[in-house]
Amino acid sequence: MADLLIPGTRVVHHGEALQWLEAQPILAGCSMITSMPDYSEFPSWSLEQWKLWFVRSARMVMEKCPDDGVAIFYQRDRKREGCWVDKAFLIQKAAEEIGMAQLWHKIVCRAPPGNTTFGSPAYSHLLCFSKGIREELQKSTMDILPQAGKTTWTRGMGTQACQFACKFILANTASHTIVDPFCGHGTVLSVANQLGLHAIGVELSRKRAEKASELHISLLK
């Protein structure tokens, strides 16, 4: 962490997320914002194999989060053989396994209300967990985010959702660094930097890791 002394700096590691996390101590001074891979990215696995991996991965992210930080997940459900795969449930299951409390569960609209979508819903989940932080009632925030914001790819987290998550961390924790162990193109990292936070990302794809190291997204609407 010594290389993150200048506000707004960014480090992206090319590697496997769980291996990287396992090698880390609890990440003091950090909060986590991430979006974990869908089962479609593991074509050789059964759905049950992916679910086990997903819960383990969520638990690992939470375990590395310090007591005075938060772990925020942005996830979109999928439909498989006529049934929804509920990722919010799987993340909540991981949180219960390690005794981490859910602070809030937001719905982020990906399409205007009233529209019909196919394969995945018109919304994403934005879920926040912490060991030690508790949200004061008078500081409650909106339950529905009208827009996710722009993305750099179909699996990316929208810029407005990123801003909401980062601003919550700035207002409610002492964290100075955002860690995204599944950083993709680096939208979370870019937004965090622009809001004055350090950022650490991990990405398995070398090409995406390189993009995440350099990505700059304007926060202007």
Image: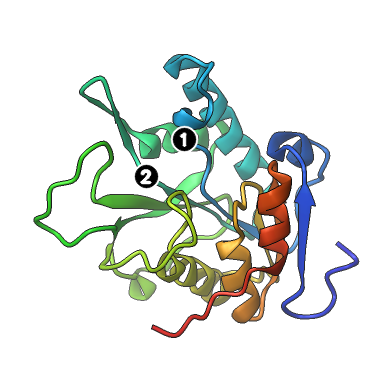
User: Image quadrant of residue 120?
Assistant: top left
Residue drawn at the location 52% of the way across and 38% of the way down: 37
Q: Give the residue at the far left of this rendering.
A: 114
Q: Position of residue 220 (x, y in %)?
A: 44, 85
Q: Which residue is mark 1?
A: 38
User: Image quadrant of residue 114?
Assistant: bottom left
Q: Position of residue 142 (x, y in %)?
A: 29, 69
Q: What mark, if any, has residue 76 been given in the picture?
A: 2
Please tell me how crowded label 1 is: few (under 14), some (14-19), or many (20+) other residues with Cα within 10 Å: some
Residue drawn at the location 67% of the way across and 60% of the way down: 211
What residue type is disc 2 on?
Arg
Is 29 situated left or right of 145 in this image?
right
Is 44 situated left or right of 67 in this image?
left
Q: CA distance from mark 2 to mark 1?
A: 8 Å
User: Image quadrant of residue 21?
Assistant: top right
Q: Position of residue 32 (x, y in %)?
A: 61, 55
Residue drawn at the location 48% of the way across and 46% of the way down: 101
Mark 2 or mark 1, earlier in chain: 1
Contact between labelled residues 1 and 2, with CB atoms less than 8 Å apart: yes
Q: Give the residue at the far right of this rendering.
A: 2
Could you tell me which secondary element the residue under label 1 belongs to?
loop
Please tell me how crowded label 2 is: few (under 14), some (14-19), or many (20+) other residues with Cα within 10 Å: many
Q: Is residue 14 above or below residue 32?
A: above
Q: How is the image coloured?
A: rainbow
| Residue 66 visible to an observer of this rendering | no
| Between 197 and 123, the one nearer to me in the picture | 123
Is 40 situated left or right of 141 in this image?
right
Q: Is residue 1 above or below residue 140?
A: above
Which quadrant is the N terminus positioned in? bottom right
| Between 96 and 191, the one nearer to me in the picture | 191
